[in-house]
Structures are given as C-alpha cells and as structure tokens.
Amino acid sequence: MIPLRFLLTAVGLGAIAASCSSETPTQHAPQHLSTAQCAEFEENGRVTICHATGSLRNPIVVLRISESACISAHSSHPGDRIAVDGDCGPTACLPAGAPHDATLRCCDGLVVRDERCVDLCAGVACGAVDQCHVAGTCDPSTGACSNPPIADGTVCADGNACTQTDVCTAGLCTGSNPVVCAAADGCHVAGTCEPATGACSNPGAADGTSCDDQSLCTAGDVCTAGSCGGATVPTDDHNPCTADACTPGGGVSHTPLSAGTACGDTDLCNGHEVCNGSGACGAGTPTATDDENPCTVDSCDAVTGLAVHAPATNGTSCDDGSACTRTDACNAGVCTGGNPVVCNALDQCHAVGTCDPMSGACSNPAAANGTGCDDGNGCTQTDTCSSGACTGGTPVVCAASDACHVAGLCNPAAGTCTNPVAADGTSCGTGGETCQSGSCARIFNASTNLSTTRTQGSCSGGGDMFAFPVTALSPTTATLAGSPNVGCFSVGDSVLLINLQGTPTSFGNVGNFELLTLASISGSTVTFTAAKTRFYGSGAADDLGLGVTAGSQRVMLQRVPTYPSLTIAAGAQLTARSWNGVLGGVFAVRTTGAITGAGSIVMNGAGFRGGASTTVGSQSGVHGESYAGLPVNYATPNFGAGSGGCGESCSGYGHAGGGAGYALAGGNSSHYPSAGGGGGSAYGDALLSRVFLGSGGGAGGADNVLYDNPSGGAGGPGGGIVLIFADSTNVAVSANGGAGAGDASSGCFGSSTTSCWDYSGPGGGGSGGSILRRGTVLGGSASVLGGAGGLGSQSGNAGAGSAGRLFSL
C-alpha cells in the first residue's frame, strides 16, 4: 500500500515544478498543511530551491509548506536562494527559446539545440513511476528522467488486499503476511480472502453444529444460520421465596426474598404464608376442618378457605359412642346406631333388661313374683316365678283320654301322658259300641236302617242319618221345611247338603253336594261354620226355587254320622231310607278309623221310583222318575227315566216299558219305538263331581181286560247314592237298580190269566245308582248294576236299566 505521506509529497512536487519555471518567476503560493503534515515533509530535509539564474535547479524538493515551516531549508549551490518570497528573479543568461548567443550563455538548465537555448527538461515531470520508486531528475542534456528505486523495505501496496505486509524490494512491491480467514466463531468455518478488498468471507457452520454461546443461561447450544444459541435454562425453582434469575457469566441464581414477603400458594386452606428471609416459605395457620363427626368427609374450600363437611357415604362404618349399638353406620351425615344390643330376659323368671351405653352390658332384673314360667317338668302346669326362680305347681292329671283308654302316667320330659288302652269289649258308647284295641267301634250285628235308628245321642223320629228338606239357602244358613226335633241335629254335626231333583226345565244344579259342619240350630234355621261353595237353585248361579211343592228343586240336608270305626257283622246290612219324592235315597257315613266286616252297605232300588203299575184297562204305562222330575204319561223317554209302554188302545194289547239310563242309555223295549217304551238317556260324569240317584224304568201298558190279564208291569226303581268317607273301607257296597215287573213263564201265552204277562206289558228296569268312596285303603266289592227289564210274551220284553256310576279316590 502507498503511505499517505508519499502520496501528498507527489502532489506537492507537481505543484512546485509548475511554479519555478523561468517563464513564471513568481513562486506558487505556499500551501498550508497541518502541523503533522509539515512535520512529515520536514523529514526529507528539502524545500523548494531556485537556481541563481532563475532556472529550476533540481526541483526534487518536496514542498514549501509555509514561510515558517520551511524557512530553514537551504541550497549548497552558490547563488541559489531559497524561494521564500515567491520568485527567483531574472539572471544574465539566455532563456529558453532564445537564439543562442555566444556572448551569453543559456540559462542554467538549457542546452543549445538548433542554435537556440532549449530547456529539454521543460515540462518534464520526473515523478516516481510507482510506489517502489522515487521521483527522478531530468537530465538537462537529454531531457530524460532518472528512475531511482525507493529504499528496500519501503511500505507499498501490491494491489492484493489479502497481503498485509507489502514492501518494496529492488523497485518491486512484494506482498507477505497473508490475511488468514480463520473461523469467526464456533458457528462459522474458515473463510477465504477477497483480493480486491482484503475482506474475509464468513461462511456459517451447518445448522445443528454443537457450539458454546458463552452463556450459562442456555443449554444444548447449537448453530442456527450462523448464530449460536440454546434452550433457555429454567430458572423457576417453584419457591415463592426466591428471586429467580440468570446471567450469562454467572448462570442461574435463586436469591432469597426479604423476610415477610407473602408467599401464599392461592390455597386459603393452609393459612397466610410469608417468607423467612432464607428462601423458605413459612407455613400459615391452616383452616380447622375436623368437626369430630365420623359421618362427614372434612375438607377445605381452597377458594374461600372455609371448612366443608360433606356427608360420608351412607353405610360408612362409624361409632355413635354407644356400646349398645353394634353395627353403627352413617346415614345422611349422622352416625346412626344399628343392630342394637337386645337385652332379652335371661330366662323366664327374669324380665327384659336394659343396655348400659358405656359397657354394652345388659341388666338382668328378676320378673315379678307370680309370673308364669316353665320349670322344665312337663308334669307341673302352674309354674310361677319367685325371686327369679321358677317353681312348679298343679301337677298334670293323666285321666283316661276316652272310654277305650284308662288313666295314664305323666312324662316329665314332655309333659305328656301315657294313654293305655282299655280292655277289649269295654263299653264305649250309647249305641252299643265297644272298645277294640283302644278304638271305640260301632258294631252292627243286625241289618239296620240308619235313617230311623239312632245310635248317637237321641232324636225322636230320626236315626243317625236324619234328613230334612231345605226350602231356602244363604251362603252360611239353610232354612228347613220344618223345625227338627231336639237332638236330631246338633252343633258340630257333619251334614250333607245335596240337590237331588230338579224340573224338566231347571236341572243344572242337580247332583251338586258338599259336606258342611253345623255351627248352630235355631228353629228351622241351621247355620254352617263356613260358607257353602256351590249353588243349589233353579238358576245356574243361585239358590232359588227350593221347596217341597211341585216344580221346586228338591234339596236335602242330611246328618252324616261319624263313627270311630264301623264294623258290619256277617249277614247284617246297613241302609237308609229310599227316595220318597221329597228326600231320601242317600247313605252317607264318616269314620276316623276303618269300615270292616263281612256285612254290607245296601242301597239297591233306593233311587228314583219306577213307573207305577196301572189299574185301568188299555191305559199306557207311565215314565219312571228321573233327576228332571216326577213321572208323566207315555211319551218320549223322560231324561234318564225309561218311558212307559203303550196300552191296548195303541195296538191291540199292552206293550213293555223302557229301561232307565245313567252311565249309559237305558235299554229299549221289544216293540220300541212303534209301541214299546224307550230307554232313558245317559247323564252325570265318571268322576262323580255331581252325584245322582239312579232313574226309574217305565211301566208296561195294560190290556183292555184286566180280569184275565195282569195290570201293566211297574218299572224298576233306580239305585241309591252311597257316600263313604273313611281311612279304610273293606265291606261290600251296592246301589243296584231294581228289576221291572213281569215274568212270562212257559205255557202262559194266550192263557188269559192274571198271572201271565201275555197281553199286558212288563216294566223296564231301573238304572244303577252312585257309589263314591274316599279313603287311603279301599277294599270290598262295589256294585251299581242296572235292573233287568220285565219279560213278556205277546207284549214283548221290557228294556233293562243302565249301570250306575262308581268312583273311588
């Protein structure tokens, strides 16, 4: 590079060269520079010097800076003077361009050319050709400039800004000490030097390059676009009593705040906190939340600082402070005792105690003297307490339990009496009963009609199976057709209520029955212990139309005797009255034991009546009786009853009657349907949910002459009803239908005698009745056969009756 002082010197030289010519003797006005600049030119020790002749002498001086600054400069040539005042003044010589005159010399610096004085150096400036040369001098003789090199080591500029120490050597500027483009910092890499400017490029390091930004307030420093930076180091120590800060050189600091500085955590529940000056937050006085109630969940509202007492979950275990409750639990925030200690009486001679809440123990007060108790001896009956002890009294008397037992002994453990049996044969009743193995057995050694024979108590005009027609019913009462005699019905008697017969237009409740118990008897009204369950009237669901007159429902109330056991001796038959058009036809009995014996219960022909024999010549036979009413004259079969045969008025002689129906239809007579009677229809059901009497057979029609012929044969009656309620039954029972009248013996045809059934018709057979047995053991035979139809000759045979119904359960 060219130092400033040399550049200014060159400028100064040009200016002086132009002012010292002989043409212009006046010196150029001094240039005023700064003191520092003047000092620099003084180093050269030269100022402008003019030749004594006025010509420029070696104008190689630098510059006249000012009068005072350059006053000390001088020349070594005689006649030369310092141009202080501005000119050199003319001399006695030929100036340039003047013709050469031998008498005068050319002024200094001129040479003769072409007979003229010529200044070859006029206008020639011998400045330094470059920075490594100094200004030359013009040779007057040749006009050529010299080109002296500057001193080696002189600073220069080689034109390459990337060399820092340029110096002249032998007139050449040579650069050295090149610019080193080191990386500016950790986020740049080494650059290259620009020769024109000497400036280094500054390329950034790759983004993400690890670096150090020399700050302790960042961490994980990396380069980004040539800048080093890192994540800010957290300063918050979450301590409200320190001032958190960070300085690049010192790093993170936590300076304790002054004592008394508020350090609350926004939670009003832990009190008002202040710093202690050492960086710690002193705790405040927390809100008191414990309400000493185990059934609340105690907490504090952080916003208000108030205590909150929420009810604990119902059922949460707690302690109500009383030892007399064992399963205390919370309920709506209140500790409620449960499963209390029950202070039962310790024994029968102590009263209920009370529980001590402190200990949970029960008191044990004695019961009042005279309080009933049990001394553990079943054979004392009036045990009482005395001073807390049970004392027995009134011993059990083991009297004979009945007529078939004798007095027993008391068992203290159970308080029960033994029950030894009386000797067999001991009398045990008013009806001839005797003891057999401890049971009172009613023994019938002879045939007996229990409708008229009384073995239990007394009944004027009635037996064990006393019966009465019913004229009205309510659910719990029955009105009888009259007032029974005293003793015939008694409170506690078991009775049978049954509808036996209806009418041709109202028979839906016939056969309904049930067993009831009498609660009271008052005149003609009896009351039952429980309401009846079925209907007995003319309507399907009523009890209307009951009575004993024509067109009424025939409803009967019959006593059902209850025997301890029943024995029927061989050859003996028990029976009850037959149906008489108002009541009868039913044998009903109960026993608590068995019904045994070689005898039998017989209700054969005790049911509905057969058609009666006519005594009027040529008259047709009448129907048998049925569940739908009384007999009528010859027509179609009357429900279950057989129809009567036609008399001679129909077809020359009387004809036979039809058989009655029940389980099946009754048999038709020989000449049915032209003139003979037809069989009755079937009715009822196999399970005997309703029980019926067997129906009667139809009567035969009469011949016109009765003195030599019998009357028309009567129809056979139906079988009765047998109801047995016993644990065990093992006797023969029958309720067969009766046979129709008529028996055409051999040789009788046309004999015209009253003993031959030749021209008058025989009667039809009655149907079998009903047998219902209820018990656990059922034995013995049971028969409900239909009666045979009467036999005739000319008149034909009558129809047979149907079998009845039998059911056991």
Image: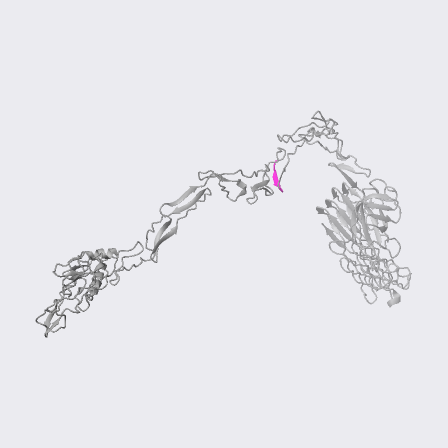
Q: Give whichever of 424, 158 is nearer the camera.
A: 158
> x, y percentage for residue 622?
86, 60
Is 670 positioned to the left or the right of 34 in the image? right
Residue 190 image position (x, y, % from top left): 27, 57
Q: Residue furthest left?
A: 102
**Figure quadrant of residue 510:** bottom right
Instruction: Give the magenta-colored segment's residue range.
Output: 326-332
Up-down relation of residue 90 to residue 787 (above or below): below
Instruction: Tell which residue pokes out farthest to the top in this image.
Output: 387
- On the image, the x and y values in percent for residue 372 come to 73, 30
Of residues 746 and 16, which is closer to you in this image? 16
Number of numbered discs visible in the structure rendering: 0
In the rendered structure, does residue 653 fall within the stretch colored magenta?
no
In the foreground, 331 or 704: 331
Point out residue 362 in the picture as x, y percentages from the top left corner. Answer: 65, 30
Quadrant in which the N terminus is drawn = bottom left
Left or right: where 280 falls relative to 80: right
The residue located at (14%, 68%) in the rendering is 121
- Asked if residue 696 shows in the view, the reply is no
Q: In the image, 248: left or right of 516? A: left
Question: Is 420 drawn above or below residue 695 in the view shown?
Answer: above
Instruction: Compare residues 302 and 138 and report the one nearer the observer.
Output: 138
* Residue 296 visible within the image: yes
Please tell me in which quadrant of the rendered image residue 430 appears: top right
